[in-house]
């Protein structure tokens, strides 16, 4: 089923690359031959860092900068993580750096140069280079195609080349060399985030697109030839003493292109631990060098451990690996475990959400903004996940049912206006201000209570035009006017709620129209009296679908945003089509056979009428699978076949009759809402079976469910 490509080859090479970096800093072959050591540390090992950059380009940048939808937010999140790691490394090497006199006489400018370009310890230049490189590539990603980004970063690489291995060619050319000297004053080397990192980051992103089509033989040949040529290039440059530094070769990007392609063809299982361990070998090996040298001196073993460069190298490799494994183990211990898609879960189709938002925006007039209802955990979908995604899609207003829901959104970083649609206890009035929430005036006495609170609060006034749930009755004009006069209430809007806008019945349509008329008549009276009420709104989902003439300043869309209506019978005058966002899934835990006449489950309520195969699935009524679906009232999809629920649904597990489903196995996915093969079960099916509405199905989703997001 899972056709996802494995990237184990890349993981293995990450370890190799880490040991190559250790070689650069220990010169393993120095005791034997200067040429051999040059080959190992200045040529072969130069493949390591570009490789790390390419992996980042491939896995972090490709989709986010050149995928279907740009996603700078998660790149920013990645930058934060790299910066944090850099911070840890800086602190780690501070004592060694101070001891070695690294920071003596350091000016502010020198410190900045270290921090941004050179790194605060010799190998740490990698981190600022990665950060700066990603920032630069993001800039390219914003404005150029991948091809153009390749060209720009290629030019940067060429410029860098002449400050590195090819310095000798231009060092005596007046003008040009002056420009470079100026550069060297800003950064010690050109192998940094501006000239070296971008090309490999972009190449990594490009490789992502090529990943499916790479072939082993051409890449192996290509790498062999280009690496041989690069070796020659390096020795020639060395012979003519042209190198100022030796990180950048003309042929290095070519070698990397073939090497990376070759590694992509190695389709072995990925080894996640190698990623962490190789990173920490990189970070820790200079400290291990200090420890090995110090330790050897202390026990009088320098002659063996240090003087023989190869043994020294091996000792450092062993030490660094041990230290890295230790760090990886400690980190694994503290990592928050993930339970995604393990037992019972919700899958959110964010592409569907984006489609629904766009469709709704097309239904309301230009000046009407969406103000999605994300109350009750975003109709069970996950309030934060949905609201953040809506923020990303440009939505800037939300409504919730309670202060606590509003606070949760704010704490999760949701931006824009948040309207609390219901009653708030006076004890919580402070929170309205602290979290910039807008409170609904649920009736006149509540307005007085809020006024007595004594501090400014933003409000929308609820107007009762016939639903008789909350709101100041529409005809009590004097009360409404008085709320506008209250000096602590900052009236930013008013709204009413339509209670029969789903109906096709002529009488109900009349009623809805009278609600709208009453509301707009009030608005007119207000402006005649000189009161300003910035925002007026009345339509929820059914209002938008059936009464486009009622669009106010906000459309408080709830259920339709999630892709369905309350029932499949509801009126939809717009004819617009929406896509369900939520799927509900679980796993098959085990499969067993029953003989005819045997019972199963609580009360032995299921009785096998024929030789029967039962699957037990990992979801129960505590997860939101209502007990009302027991005894075949509900079904699930397994391997593209529909299977009825057998017997009584339990709290955490459910039996399913899979006699007619071929080849069911432990670990199979059972779909309760959503698609499997060509079969679909909708929230309508479940709601109809239970005699309720989809809203209730969604909002009864259990707290134990995990949530997984799918973007396409
Ligand atoms: C819940 C709610 C909404 C959203 O209703 P849907 O029918 O789900 O679109 C809108 N307005 C108010 C006042 C609500 O309580």
Image (cartoon, rainbow, N blue to C red):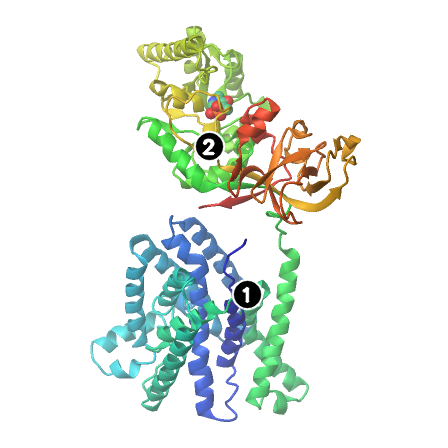
**Percent from the top left, x then y, of residue 711?**
45, 46
Task: Write the residue at 47% across / 55% down.
Answer: 78
Tally the marks.
2
Q: Is residue 404 left or right of residue 110?
A: right
Report which residue position mark 2 lands on: 563
What is the quadrant of residue 279 in the picture?
bottom right
Looking at the image, is 10 positioned above or below residue 4?
A: below
**Percent from the top left, x then y, of residue 542?**
43, 21
Callout 2–callout 1 Cβ contact below 8 Å:
no
What is the quadrant of residue 484 in the picture?
top left
Mark 1 Cβ and ligand 1 under 8 Å apart: no
Looking at the image, is 649 positioned above or below residue 95?
A: above
Report which residue position mark 1 lands on: 275
Q: Secondary structure at mark 1?
A: helix
Mark 1: few, some, or many residues within 10 Å (few <14, many ≥20)? Answer: some
Q: Is residue 305 left or right of residue 228?
A: right
Going from N to C along the chain, the mark reached first, 2 or 1, is 1
């Amino acid at each position: 089923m899972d056709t996802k490509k494995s990237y184990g080859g890349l993981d293995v090479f990450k370890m190799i690359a880490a040991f190559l970096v250790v070689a650069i800093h220990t010169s393993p072959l120095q005791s034997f031959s200067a040429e051999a050591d040059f080959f190992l540390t200045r040529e072969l090992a130069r493949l390591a860092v570009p490789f790390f950059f390419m992996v980042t380009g491939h896995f972090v940048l490709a989709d986010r900068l050149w995928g279907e939808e740009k996603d700078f937010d998660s790149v920013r999140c990645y930058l934060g993580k790299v910066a944090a790691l850099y911070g840890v490394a800086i602190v780690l090497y501070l004592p060694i750096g101070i001891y070695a006199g690294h920071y003596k006489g350091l000016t502010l400018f020198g410190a900045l140069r270290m921090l941004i370009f050179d790194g605060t310890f010799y190998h740490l230049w990698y981190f600022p280079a990665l950060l700066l490189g990603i920032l630069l590539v993001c800039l390219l990603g914003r404005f150029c195609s991948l091809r153009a980004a390749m060209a720009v970063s290629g030019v940067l690489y060429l410029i860098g080349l002449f400050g590195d291995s090819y310095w000798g060619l231009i060092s005596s050319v007046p003008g040009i060399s002056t420009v470079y000297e100026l550069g060297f004053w800003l950064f010690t080397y050109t192998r940094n985030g501006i000239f070296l990192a971008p090309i490999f980051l972009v190449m990594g992103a490009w490789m992502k697109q090529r990943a499916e089509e790479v072939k082993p033989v051409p890449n192996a040949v290509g790498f062999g030839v280009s690496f041989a040529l690069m070796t020659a290039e390096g020795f020639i440059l060395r012979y003519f003493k042209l190198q100022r530094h030796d990180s950048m070769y003309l042929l290095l990007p070519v070698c990397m292109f073939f090497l990376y392609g070759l590694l992509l063809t190695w389709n072995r299982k990925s080894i996640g631990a190698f990623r962490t361990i190789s990173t920490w070998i990189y970070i820790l090996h200079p400290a291990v060098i200090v420890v090995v040298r110090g330790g050897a001196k202390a026990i009088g073993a320098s002659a063996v451990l240090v003087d023989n460069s190869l043994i020294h190298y091996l000792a450092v490799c062993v030490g660094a690996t041990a230290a890295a494994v230790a760090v990886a183990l400690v980190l694994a211990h503290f990592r928050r475990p993930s339970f995604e898609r393990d037992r019972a879960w919700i899958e959110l189709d964010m592409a569907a959400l984006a489609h629904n938002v766009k469709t709704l925006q097309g239904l309301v007039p230009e000046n009407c903004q969406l103000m999605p209802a994300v109350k009750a955990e975003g109709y069970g979908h996950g309030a934060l996940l949905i609201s953040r995604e809506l923020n990303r899609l440009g939505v800037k207003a939300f409504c919730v049912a309670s202060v606590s829901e509003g606070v949760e959104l704010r704490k999760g970083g949701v931006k824009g206006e948040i309207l609390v649609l219901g009653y708030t206890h006076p004890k919580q009035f402070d929170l309205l201000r602290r979290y910039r929430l807008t409170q609904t005036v649920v009736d006149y006495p509540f307005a007085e209570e809020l006024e007595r609170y004594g501090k400014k609060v933003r409000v929308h006034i609820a107007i009762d035009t016939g639903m008789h749930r909350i709101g100041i009755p529409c005809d009590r004009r004097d009360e409404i006017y008085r709320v506008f006069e209250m000096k602590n209430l900052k009236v930013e809007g008013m709204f009413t709620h339509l209670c029969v806008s789903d109906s096709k019945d002529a009488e109900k349509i009349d009623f809805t129209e009278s609600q709208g008329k009453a509301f707009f008549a009030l608005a007119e009276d207000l402006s005649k009296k000189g009161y300003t009420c910035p925002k007026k709104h009345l339509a929820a989902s059914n209002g938008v679908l059936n009464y486009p003439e009622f669009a106010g300043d906000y459309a408080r869309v709830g259920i339709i945003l999630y892709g369905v209506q309350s029932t499949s019978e509801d009126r939809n005058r717009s004819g617009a089509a929406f896509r369900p966002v939520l799927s509900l899934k679980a796993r098959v835990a085990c499969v067993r056979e029953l003989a005819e006449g045997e019972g199963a489950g609580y009360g032995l309520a299921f009785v096998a009428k024929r030789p029967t195969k039962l699957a037990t699935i990992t979801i129960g009524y505590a997860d939101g699978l209502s007990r009302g679906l027991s005894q075949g009232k509900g079904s699930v999809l397994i391997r593209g076949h529909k299977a009825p629920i057998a017997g009584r649904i339990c709290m955490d597990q459910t039996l399913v009759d899979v006699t007619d489903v071929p080849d069911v196995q432990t670990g199979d996915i059972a779909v309760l809402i959503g698609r499997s093969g060509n079969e679909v079960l909708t929230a309508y099916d479940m709601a109809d079976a239970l005699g309720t509405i989809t809203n209730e199905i969604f909002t009864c989703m259990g707290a134990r469910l995990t949530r997984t997001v799918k973007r396409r």
